[in-house]
Image (cartoon, rainbow, N blue to C red):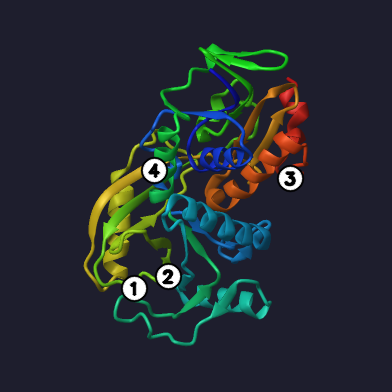
Amino acid sequence: MLVDFLIIGQGISGTWLSYYLGKENKSFLVIDNNFQNAPSRLAAGIINPVTGRRHATVWMANKLLLFAWNAYNELGKELNIKAISQKNIIDFFPSPQMRLSFQQRVEEKGEFVSLNKEDNRYSSYFHYEFGYGVVTPAYTAHLETIIPAWRKKLKDKNQLLEEEFDISLLESGQKQIHYKDITANKIIFCDGAGCADNPYFKLLPFAPNKGEALTLKISGLPDDHIFKKGMMLVPLATPGEWWIGSSYEWEFTDTHPSENFRKKTEQLLKEWLKVPFTVTDHLAGLRPATLERRPFVGLHPFHPNIGILNGMGTKGCSLAPFFARQLADHLLFQKPVTPEADISRFSKILSR
């Protein structure tokens, strides 16, 4: 088989890269092992313009938000699904100090944050003593429908190979790569945390962390927003289904769901919610985070037929469509990648 591009992984990065390469009428094949605990399968799809306890504006927020909104809506039309919803964040303050911190951010004219005056609006559904702020706009990308819908399209067009990729079988020539009976002009790794063991990219400053979440059934809870009090409570695409999470563990012994997380989260829900809930699933997985919290995008500086789109961390839903488009434009039209994300910034490391 001869294709222009071989893409490893069909998470959020591989989905978007294959989408944009297809838009440019390039041939490609995606290899994906259908791993059920892949980060894209576990994520709630939150696109949040602020971060941290100080609600600092995230990197490239305005540009990423606009691009993501347009991109997901375009993809949704093509797949005949609802791919994105605006779900602003109702941020309940756990203490007077956190309310004061949020208020100070508002007074500093912090972008995307406002202090709410209708403190009793959600009192029928939640216990909260110190009011709440609002983060707007925020979105949810419906990965639970996007990933399988795009996968079906790939299967229908014979553009997906469901198997484990064996990098020991990869041969890189001067102009092409070869893998089993596949020949491609370039191979692009979009395989998340697994890329930290890739011999071509293992020297990059990956910093994978473990995340956990629960999925829930909650009847009667308004699903027009994301709710936050220590954890994010996020409405999923199916009415009455919710997601809550997720933890950040930098030191862990395994990637399995932990009883400690489940107990802690259920206790939080019992103290926070006034309406009944049922846990339907417990999820865990590794996020492909990086030490500097910037993605890895581009072609290997010493192996120009081998590329990467990875390191999206917790911001994958906003970063992936934007940088997949940039990478496609770089591969096809030699357009530059944003310097802070360009893999060439690690040329010295990758030369070892």
The residue pinned by badge 4 equals: 148
Are circles 2 and 1 on residues that touch, CB within 8 Å? Answer: yes
State the CA–CA distance, disc 2 to disc 4: 24 Å
The residue pinned by badge 3 equals: 340
State the CA–CA distance, disc 1 to disc 4: 26 Å
At label 3, the amino acid type is Glu
Q: Quadrant of the C terminus?
A: top right
What residue sits 42% from the left and 61% below the top?
232
Q: Identify the secondary structure beneath mark 2.
A: loop
At label 2, the amino acid type is His
Foreground residue, 88 or 335? 335
Query: Viewed as shown, does residue 1 lie left or right of 219?
Result: right
The residue pinned by badge 1 equals: 222
Q: Percent from the top left, x then y, of residue 89?
A: 48, 69
Q: Identify the secondary structure beneath mark 4.
A: helix
* Tag in front: 2 or 4: 4
Q: Percent from the top left, x then y, of residue 88?
A: 49, 70
Are circles 1 and 4 on residues that touch, CB within 8 Å? Answer: no
State the CA–CA distance, disc 2 to disc 1: 7 Å
| Disc 1 residue crowd, few under 14, some 14–19, many 20+, Cα 10 Å | some
Pick whichever of labels 2 and 4 is earlier in the sequence. 4
At label 1, the amino acid type is Pro
* Residue 225 disc label: 2
In the figure, 12 relative to 331: above or below? Answer: below
Pick whichever of labels 4 and 3 is earlier in the sequence. 4
* Tag in front: 4 or 3: 4
Query: Viewed as shown, does residue 62 lie left or right of 263?
Result: right
| Disc 3 residue crowd, few under 14, some 14–19, many 20+, Cα 10 Å | some
